[in-house]
Structures are given as C-alpha cells and as structure tokens.
Image (spheres, rainbow, N blue to C red):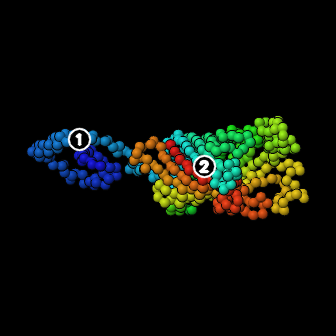
Amino acid sequence: MRTTGILLLVTGLTIPGAARAQEEPATDPGNSATDTAPATPDAAEVQALEDDMEAAKKKIEAAGVEEIAATPVDTAAPADSAATEKPAASVEDDRPASVRLAEGGAADRAFGALVVLDHTLGVGTFVRDATLRGSRAYVAQSWDLRPTYKFEAFGHKLKAGARFLFELELTTPDSNPARRFKPSDISVYLLDNNIYTEPLTGVTFTGVARWFLPTSWESVNVTNRYSALALGAGANRTFGPVYLEYGFSFTKNLNSTKGLQTPTDVPLHSFAGAGRRGDALPLEVGDSYDNGLNKSFRLTNSFAVTYNFDEHLSASYSLALLNDFRYTQDNVNVVDELSSPFADAGRGRTDSLWPTLDVTYVLDDLVAKVYPLPFSLMASVGLTALHPAQTRDNGNLIWPFFYQALGTNRAANNYASFYLDLVGVY
C-alpha cells in the first residue's frame, strides 16, 4: 500500500507539566528595583519574521493541507488529572481462537449469535452384518442456535443466552415410534466468564446458571418433565499454547412423576409386554414403573485440554463424567437372588463417560480472500463417544479411549460417532 506524505502545522501546542519545566526562574522580590525591562525588537526584524510566516502559510495552502487550529489548554488542571491519564491497558486474552469464538463473537458487540451445523455418522453404519447394519446405521444433521446478549452488572461482564437444538436423522430411525425430527429441550442461561482471577496462579473462575424448558419428545411424553435447573462453576488457565479447563455442574430435574411413562402413541407390547404382543393397543399415560424410574438429578465433571498450533489451528481432548441419580421407590433396586454381585442397592444410578477428540480450524483468512463475511467461520472434525462407564455387569470399566466404544463388539451400539461441524460466530 502506498502512502502520500502530508505536511501538518501545529500551533499553540502546550504539554502540561513540560511547559512548566521550561519556564524562566522567578526574579528575587528583594531585588525587584534592579530588574530591567526586556529589549524592544527592531521594526526590520519584526517585518522579516512576518514575511517568513506569510511565505510558510502560502506553501501550506499550495500543498492542500488545512491548518490545524490551536487547542486551548486549561492550565488550571493539574498535570496528573484524569483528563491527561492514559486508558488502562486491556487484559490480553491468550486463549485459543477456537475457544474465544465459541464463547460468543466480538467482545465489543452486545448482541451476538453462534450457529453450528453438525453432521454425524455413527459407527454402527460400518458394522459388517448387512441385517444389523440396516437397523444400526445412523447419519444425522443437527442445528444448534445460540443467541447471546452481553451486558455489565455489579462490576462484572455477563452474558445471557439461549440454546435451540434440533436433529434430523437421515437414515431410517431405529426407534418406536420412528421420528426423524428430534428437538431437544430449550435452555436459557446466564454466564460470567470471569468471576475472579487468582493473581498468583492466573487461574480464572467462571459460573453459569441454566434453566431447561421441556420441548423434547422425551421430556413431554416419557419423563413428564416440566423443567430443570442447573448451576455450574469452572476454572481455566493458559500455559503458552496449552489451554486447560475444568467444569462442574449440578442439574435438578423437575418431573411430575417418579416413574417413566408409556406414551399414548406407542403400542403396549413395545414396552410392557405382559403376554399381549398381538394387539398393539396404545396404553394410556399413567404412573407405571415398567420402564424404570426417572432421573432426579445429575452431577457433571468435565475436563478439557486444547493445544493451539497457531492462530488458526487447534486440537483438543475433552472428557465428561455424568452421574445420574434416579428417584427412590420401594421394592426397586433391592438385592435379591437375581441381582448381579456388582449391583448396588438403594437409589438407582447411571454413570456415563463422554470423551471427544476434536480438531478446529478458523477459516476467516481463507474465506476473506473470496468474500469478506460479516461473521467468523470455523470448521471442526472429530470423534466423540457417549457410553456407560462400566460394562453391563458393572465388573469392568469402559475406558474413554474410543477403542472400547468402537471395537470389542460394541460398534453396533453407536456409542461413538464421527462428526463434521461448520460453526458461524457473529
């Protein structure tokens, strides 16, 4: 880029403090009688000075540069007043670009949005047996919409947001009843990304409150859930190119009944059986515990590590441990002759592991060469798995290393899936 030089003339510029240091020392009051008056300049010298100033003014006008008027300076203001102070330097955000963008766009924009277009391919799609593959193949597309609003309150920068997530299965649904369109529960939340930064270690603590609304098929028809509340806290720290993050949350489900319900549009034999597999008559919704107890609350612990190769490319591994606790009910989860030796009596509990391996690339510079978009764009590819923490007999762990979810005859369970995401952040 070429630049053209511009001549600027600044007159009457006074720097507070510096001008005071260049002042002549005051005369001694005791010797005021001996002070002499300053000499009067010669008329020829005055005329020569005026001629020089006029010549300089003509040169500026010929160059097409507008003269800058002198800015009056309030000499009454002290040199260290707020008017002369420099603004405090903002804290540098050294997190990976993918992490910053995922948390909500430009910092100086109040309204923002994040949109994720996800394509998922379950590992059950690759099983060798053709008959099993026909029922286990899973390909789906989902949309994740997250509008946000940033504001300040009580000295903190907060973010309010909502999340709308729905899925469209592209293969034949393996469910009863078969549904291709599957909306998830809508949630609204309030997030503080920096409750406190510990000065010695540099660890930043975060907090979030979330409210779930029952918009999924399962919440409305199976669990009869009318709401859920979650509180979470986290901590993160950057070590050069490595970004570490830990999170914990408690979620309380507010269900109308303790037991899972049998939907009215599902044939009776598909759930209860009871020797009536031939009639396929719908069962009225009632307080039936044939399908087990609802989940009362959940504890979630999560950990993530992200390595930032450069300003565009990053790779991460995350792991979440989900502990779901069910409602209690008499004569349920009691130890008898049919119980596994590894089973625990009392409140039912389900433990799940959720590992994810992800590679993300920020596409802004590549896209800008073709067309400058008004938002940021990222692409992510990865492998994720959601599976029980233990085997069916509770005798062994299913380690979150993907192999046990992909192999050992578990591929047909579709515990693991490959995904390709396109993420837009405004």
Q: Residue furthest left?
A: 44
Which of discs 1 and 2 lies nearer the camera? The answer is 2
In the rendering, at what x and y percent does residue 43 appear? 10, 43
Q: Residue at x 84, y 60 (%)?
A: 340
Q: In this view of the protein, can residue 258 be seen by the observer?
A: no
Q: Residue at x 53, y 47 (%)?
A: 422
Q: Residues within 10 Å of mark 2 (few under 14, many from 20)?
A: many
Element at badge 2?
Answer: strand
Q: Residue at x 86, y 51 (%)?
A: 332
In the rendering, at what x and y percent does residue 178 appear? 71, 41
Q: Quadrant of residue 161?
A: top right
**Kind of residue at badge 1:** Val
Q: Residue at x 28, y 54 (%)?
A: 22
Residue 99, disc:
none
Along the horizontal axis of the image, is 222 left or right of 137? Answer: right
Depth check: 73 or 304 in front? 304
**Alpha carbon of mark 1 to alpha carbon of mark 2: how far?**
62 Å
Depth check: 208 or 76 in front? 208
Q: Residue furthest bottom?
A: 396
Element at badge 1?
Answer: loop
Q: Quadrant of residue 356?
A: bottom right
Which residue is label 2 attached to? 120
In the rendering, at what x and y percent does residue 200 appear? 56, 62
Which residue is label 1 attached to? 65
In the rendering, at what x and y percent does residue 121 appear? 61, 50
Depth check: 348 or 389 in front? 389
**Kind of residue at badge 2:** Thr
Q: Earlier in the sequence, mark 1 or mark 2?
A: 1
Q: In this view of the protein, can residue 73 be seen by the observer?
A: yes
Along the horizontal axis of the image, is 165 left or right of 392? Answer: left
